[in-house]
């Protein structure tokens, strides 16, 4: 419905195996249940709020809290280029890395080791949700801490 109104919605989905008493089936489920991302001009948010199924817009009181564009791009890139993307517990600490080569070149996140493999964890900080994908250790390059603005206007970038 948002797309029919001219907006750019993004609902990240992943494959999930669901088991019933008589069968197991693979289905598409939202990566972040309860959330749909959308580019829109914050000054014109009423049409978004009037869309069926929209409960609210993430924010603090009447102040919207846009998701940084680079966090959305990291999730989109992982979903587009990797087979086994899965939800991952949100992390506040860990080594921040940038992938320098391979299909995820340019994506930034945190590296974790799990079952003798390395995974890139990309987070959507405001939602306190993360996703992970297995990476080749050789692709990663440690990043220096960089001061960035608290909020980058993802929601306000509607053309």
Image (cartoon, helix red, strand yellow):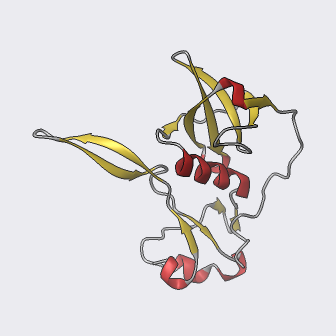
Measuring from the top left, give residue 105's x and y in whole percent.
71, 43
Task: Give the number of callouts.
Answer: 0
Q: Pick the quarter of the image with the N terminus.
A: bottom left
Residue extending farthest left: 22
Measuring from the top left, give residue 118's x and y in whole percent.
60, 24
Task: Say which quarter of the image contains residue 6.
Answer: bottom right
Q: Is residue 141 above or below residue 58?
A: above
Q: Pick the quarter of the image with the C terminus.
A: bottom right
Q: Nearer the viewer, residue 29 or 34?
A: 29
Task: Say which quarter of the image contains residue 153.
Answer: bottom right
Residue extending farthest top: 116
The answer to whether residue 46 is seen in the rendering is yes
**Would you say 146 lies left or right of 60 here?**
right
Q: Is residue 16 above or below residue 63?
A: above
Q: Is residue 37 above or below residue 76?
A: below
Measuring from the top left, give residue 73's x and y in whole percent.
66, 54
Task: Say which quarter of the image contains residue 144.
Answer: top right
Measuring from the top left, give residue 129's x and y in whole percent.
57, 43
The answer to whether residue 93 is seen in the rendering is no
Q: Residue at x 35, y 43 (%)?
A: 16
Q: Residue at x 63, y 33 (%)?
A: 120
Q: Residue at x 50, y 41 (%)?
A: 85
Q: Is residue 130 above or below residue 96?
A: below
Q: Residue at x 55, y 35 (%)?
A: 133
């Amino acid at each position: 419905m948002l797309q029919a109104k001219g907006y750019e919605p993004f609902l990240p989905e992943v494959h999930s195996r669901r088991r019933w008493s008589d069968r197991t089936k693979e289905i598409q489920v939202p990566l972040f249940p309860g959330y749909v991302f959308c580019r829109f001009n914050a000054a014109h948010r009423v049409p978004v709020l009037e869309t069926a199924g929209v409960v609210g817009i993430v924010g603090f009181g009447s102040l919207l809290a846009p998701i940084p564009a680079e966090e959305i791009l990291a999730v989109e890139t992982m979903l587009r280029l990797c087979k086994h993307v899965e939800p991952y517990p949100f992390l506040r600490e860990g080594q921040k890395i940038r992938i320098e080569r391979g299909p995820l070149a340019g994506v930034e996140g945190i590296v974790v080791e799990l079952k003798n493999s390395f995974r890139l964890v990309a987070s959507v900080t405001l939602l306190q949700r993360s996703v992970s994908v297995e990476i080749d250790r050789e692709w990663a390059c440690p990043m220096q801490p960089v001061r960035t603005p608290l909020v980058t206007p993802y929601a306000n970038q509607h053309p």
